[in-house]
Amino acid sequence: MSKINQVHIYTDGACSGNPGPGGYGIVMEWVGKPYKKEFSEGYKKTTNNRMELLAVIVALEKIKTSNVEITVFSDSKYVVDAVEKKWLLGWQRKQFKNVKNPDLWKRFLKTYNPKNTNFKWIKGHNNHPQNERCDFLAVQASKKELLLEDVGYTKSENLLF
């Protein structure tokens, strides 16, 4: 009997001002293997919740096999509770009406597989090595000279006026 592959994904989002320049950081580790990857990206104007969620989405999109058990560790109650407390199912049923970040939640649903993906909340800024590393990556990404446009945020902001 072969042991199923396990991946631990650690994510964090950061924002200087809310909204303001922001970024995400990701650390991905194969359990029991000396394999680790890090990713980050920064955006001109966004929110902390968008960066927290985008980090999870980008990490899940990087997984290229379905034969893997995934555990996502995040310090975002917004993201973890939306999935674990099944708020997301209700939001989906009402077609994301009056829900923040519908573009990202819809993108999340395209890559999320509840059969092989679990979420665990971890306390932020609590000396957890991978979470601290993700925070560092997210903050550094938000300070880059060339930041991307968070098109989903820009579109939703323009709908308000």
Image (cartoon, helix red, strand yellow):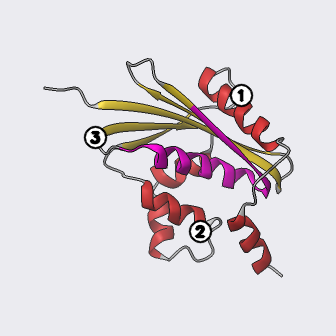
* Res 23 visible: yes
Query: Which residue occupies the foreground of this view, 71 or 64?
Result: 64
Question: Of the residues shown, which amino acid type is indicated by label 1?
Answer: His
Whether 62 is among the magenta residues is yes
Q: Earlier in the sequence, mark 1 or mark 3?
A: 3
Identify the image quadrant of the C terminus: bottom right
Q: Which quadrant of the figure has residue 27?
A: top right
Residue at the disc numbered 2: 102
Question: Of the residues shown, which amino acid type is indicated by label 3?
Answer: Asn
Residue at the disc numbered 1: 125
Q: At 54% from the left edge and 30% from the top edge, which residue is drawn? A: 37
Q: Position of residue 105 (x, y in %)?
A: 54, 62
Residue at the disc numbered 3: 67
Q: Is residue 29 above or below residue 99?
A: above
Dots 1, 2 in contact, CB < 8 A: no
For label 3, the SS is loop
Whether 121 is among the magenta residues is no
- Which residues fall within the magenta stretch? 38-64
